Image (spheres, rainbow, N blue to C red):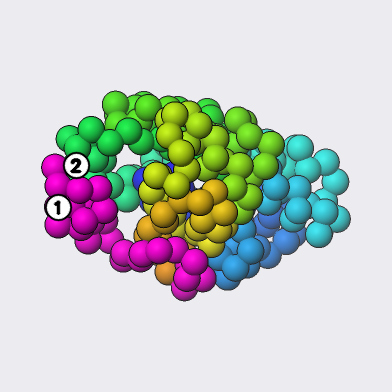
Amino acid sequence: MDGVIADSESIHYEADRRVMAAHGVEFTYEDKKANYIGRTVRGTMFELSEAHGIPDPEIVLQVRQDLFRELIATELQLRDGVRELLIQLSDRGLPCALVTSGDRWYIDSVFKRFDLMQFFAGMITVDDVDGHKPLPDPYLAGAKLLGVPPKTCLAVEDSTAGVVSAKAAGMYCIAAPSEMTIDADLSAADMRVESFQELDTTTLDRLFGTK
């Protein structure tokens, strides 16, 4: 969801940066881009806490999430063109599932705020699987939720971990990098677009058949 549906990667970084700064740690934009895009928030906070000798990572995580809630309340927006793409997919009768490393409370709040649930048959969040991206588990669970074979699914991803996860699940994958992942290694994807406007009617006809 982050970086694909919601233009949120920079907000995640700001929450990470602030909580690390409170413990005297400089967490750079480059470090976030290189090592933590597509990872779970819990995994990121626990790994950073261990690396910098910060005690009680659970408290670090809670403070970080409180900061994130404050930021998304005023700054979060959908990625350009995503609503239009979702409408096109809905008009074609194509079932969609959200597969994300995000927490369910966060996804629920974004879906409610932007009225997105109408476009999705369901969601797989960090709470629903034991293995997370880049493992295939989230996407395999997404295919199971839809009741279709993974090989018939198309995934849209903006991160290296997400692309690797989708491909490991046997899916066709479109890389749609966000500002933070524009330089990431997305070469394992089957196709790359720089904006959702590239997924026009002609492209969708090629991918899914004529409407």
Disc 2 secondary structure class:
helix
Side of 198 relative to 144 (left or right):
left
Q: Position of residue 169 (x, y in %)?
A: 54, 49
Q: Quadrant of the C terminus?
A: top left
Q: Which residue is mark 1?
A: 201
Reading the chain from its start, which is encountered first: label 1 or label 2?
Answer: 2
Q: Residue at the location (46% across, 39% down)?
A: 149
Side of 120 relative to 56 (left or right):
left
What kind of residue is marked 2? Gln
Asked if disc 1 and disc 2 are in contact, CB closer than 8 Å, the reply is yes
Residue 88, numbered circle: 2
Q: Quadrant of the N terminus?
A: top left
Residue range highlighted in magenta: 183-211
Q: Residues under labels 1 and 2: Cα distance? A: 8 Å
Q: Residue at the location (47% across, 70% down)?
A: 187
Q: Residue at the location (32% across, 45% down)?
A: 78
Q: Position of residue 58 (x, y in %)?
A: 76, 37
Q: Nearer the viewer, residue 64 or 138?
A: 138
Classed neighbour count for the residue bearing mark 1: other residues with Cα under 10 Å, few (<14), some (14–19), many (≥20):
some
